[in-house]
Amino acid sequence: MALTTDIYNLEGKTEEKLTFPKEFFGAKINPALMAQAVRVYLSNQRSASAHAKTRGEVIGSTRKIYRQKGTGKARHGDIKAPVFVGGGKAHGPTGSQNYQLIMTKKMRLLALKSALSQMLTDKKIIGVTDLEKTKGKVKPVGKLIEIIKKETKSKKFLFVLPAKSSELKRTIANLDGVTVAEIRNLSPYQVLTAGIILITPEALEDVKK
């Protein structure tokens, strides 16, 4: 597999190739590990907000609804029992559930390498350059996105930038269908859910360090 891709400038022209380091973009593709990384990421985004009242938390009378014997009906206590409409919930969510999952740094890195290698194999990684020339303007990047949209038929794009690109990150993030990540904070989930990854040569230099 060729570890290269075209580099687009702001005008949408391709003049050279971008070469990727084999360690990160030519790694063994491990679907199971990538699936685990996605599962861990999504689970760690969950918050235990659901809470159902128990019979002790429901406001209402504690009076026995009818006498124990002689009615021919099943025996019951108060109206707050889970069997009644409006009663408490038996074994319901308490709001204290912990959905956090753990994935070691080594496994997370292997999953990231696998995801990047998968995207490059699928020809879903493109190089972009001259982004610093936008000087905070969105329009030039928007034009480039439209050109790449026509060629790739994709509606989702992930820009991968070098470290300390906060100003450029704010500029690009204003575009529809575009997410931005610095290379040092890139996650397997972001890579695998991106339609097309647009990466700068400077970001690749950060990978090699």
Image: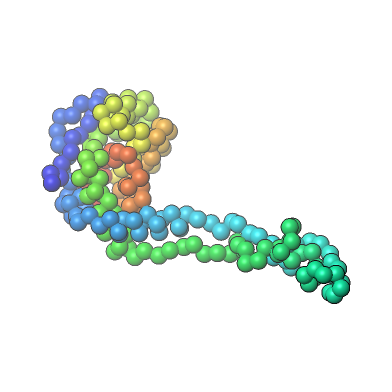
Viewer can see residue 161: no
Residue 51, position as x, y percentages in the image: 63, 59
Residue 108 lies, with reference to residue 154, above or below; the image says below
Q: Residue at x 22, y 43 (%)?
A: 122
Quadrant of the rendered structure where residue 85 is? bottom right
Q: Is residue 143 left or right of residue 63?
A: left
Q: Residue at x 40, y 34 (%)?
A: 177
Residue 153 lies, with reference to residue 162, above or below; the image says above
Viewer can see residue 155: yes
**Depth check: 42 or 90 in front?**
90
The extreme left residue here reads 2
Residue 48, position as x, y percentages in the image: 56, 59
**Depth check: 65 or 208 in front?**
65
Residue 101, position as x, y percentages in the image: 43, 63
Residue 179, position as x, y percentages in the image: 38, 40
Quadrant of the rendered structure where residue 79 is? bottom right
The extreme front residue here reads 72
Residue 187 lies, with reference to residue 201, above or below; the image says below
